[in-house]
Image (cartoon, rainbow, N blue to C red):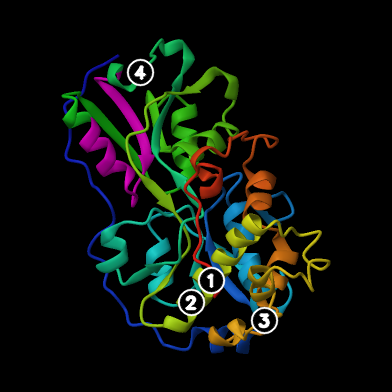
């Protein structure tokens, strides 16, 4: 491989002005009749439109669950496709109500950018994809490689840390739009494509010959991905995080899209509280007591969302791994409704 001099990596987006959130997002959402959800410009398994413009994916299902919790119907949501560079500005400015776009929870974003992460929908880590005929079995063999990635993401900083830490030379080839990165890599403009491992499996499906490419075993970062809202509106923050918590708790309690109706009247106190048959927990976050029932009916529990969009029986074929429930040895865990 041709060798390059290591440039200064750009790192994560910094310096965006923090705008104050109007503390009435839920009221505004109810008034307009839908949730405006920021998603990717097309990432299979997470947020991806089909030929007719219908969106699907894990991040999309979360937005539909929020809509169902508020309005009782999953289609009360509109999707705004955003590049990595655009996503935070769109949220800060109020163009969208919530960002659900394979976005990593970091300290900078959680403080300096004036954002709140509602939880983790997918525990990920950054990886590398190469052409099989390159004959490379480890990322430690990539000295001198050109590396394609997105601007405005954490990936550039992670690459810089990894290559410098291992005394490897490289060149970044960065683009704003994800499809531009994929096209550049597919055309041979770089040796390596790096992003979150889940994204590599998803974007590989868009390549001319997906079978000619492989994901290397190294995971070089922690990338907890989850939905984001603006700071300054605790009620909306509560809605965002407790809808996610409800979907996770539903899986733990054995509640599914098909059986949630028949589970009404259960003797299990945890089920009774989640389904609104005991207490007034929905009122605490400005919703009806059937908020969780409606969310689960709309998209199922967390495990159903995972299996439908990215699981072993999908084209991505990603095992649950660390995204199993905590009770099954994974990291997925939600506070109780109590």
Kindly identify which residue carries mark 1: 242
Name the residue rendered at 54%, 37% in the picture: 203
Q: Are marks 3 and 4 in contact (CB under 8 Å)?
A: no
Mark 4 vs mark 1, foreground winner is 1
Q: Secondary structure at mark 3?
A: loop
Kindly identify which residue carries mark 3: 278
Q: Secondary structure at mark 2?
A: helix
Segment tinted magenta in the rendering = 142-162
Q: Quadrant of residue 36?
A: bottom right
Q: Earlier in the sequence, mark 3 or mark 2?
A: 2
Name the residue rendered at 62%, 48% in the picture: 306
Q: Position of residue 244 (x, y in %)?
A: 55, 64
Q: Can residue 209 be seen from the camera position used here?
A: no
278 relative to 334 in the view: left or right: right
Kindly identify which residue carries mark 2: 238
Residue reaching furthest to the right: 262
Q: Earlier in the sequence, mark 2 or mark 4?
A: 4
Q: Earlier in the sequence, mark 3 or mark 4?
A: 4
Residue 153 is covered by the magenta coloring: yes
**Dot 2, crowdedness within 10 Å: few (<14), some or many (≥20)?**
some
Residue 276 is covered by the magenta coloring: no
Mark 3 vs mark 2, foreground winner is 3
């Amino acid at each position: 491989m041709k060798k390059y001099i290591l440039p200064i990596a750009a790192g994560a987006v910094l310096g965006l002005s923090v705008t104050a959130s109007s503390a009435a997002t839920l009221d505004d959402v109810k008034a307009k009749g839908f949730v405006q959800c920021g998603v990717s410009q097309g990432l299979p398994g997470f947020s991806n439109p089909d030929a007719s413009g219908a969106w699907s994916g894990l991040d999309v299902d979360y937005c539909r669950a929020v809509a169902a919790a508020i309005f009782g119907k999953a289609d009360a949501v509109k999707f705004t496709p955003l590049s990595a560079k655009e996503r935070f500005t769109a949220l800060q400015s109020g163009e969208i109500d919530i960002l659900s776009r394979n976005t990593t929870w970091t300290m900078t974003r959680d403080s300096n950018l004036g954002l709140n992460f509602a939880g983790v929908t997918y525990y990920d880590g950054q990886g590398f994809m190469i052409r099989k005929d390159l004959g490379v079995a480890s990322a430690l063999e990539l000295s001198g490689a050109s590396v394609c990635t997105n601007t405005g993401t954490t990936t550039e900083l992670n690459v810089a840390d990894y290559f410098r830490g291992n005394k490897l030379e490289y060149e970044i080839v960065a683009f704003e739009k994800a499809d531009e990165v994929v096209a550049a890599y597919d055309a041979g403009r770089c040796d390596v494509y790096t992003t979150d491992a889940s994204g590599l499996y998803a974007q590989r499906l868009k390549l001319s010959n997906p079978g000619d490419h492989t994901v290397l075993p190294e995971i070089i970062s922690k990338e907890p991905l989850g939905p984001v809202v603006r700071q300054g509106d605790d009620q909306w923050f509560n809605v965002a995080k407790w809808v996610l918590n409800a979907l996770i708790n539903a899986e733990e309690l054995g509640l599914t899209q098909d059986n949630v109706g028949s589970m009404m009247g259960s003797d299990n106190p945890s089920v009774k509280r989640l389904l609104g048959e005991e207490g007034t927990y929905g009122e605490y976050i400005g919703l009806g007591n059937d908020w969780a029932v409606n969310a689960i009916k709309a998209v199922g529990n967390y495990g159903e969302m995972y299996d439908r969009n990215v699981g072993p029986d999908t084209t991505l074929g990603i095992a649950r791994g660390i995204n199993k429930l905590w009770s099954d040895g994974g990291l997925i865990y939600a506070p109780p409704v109590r």
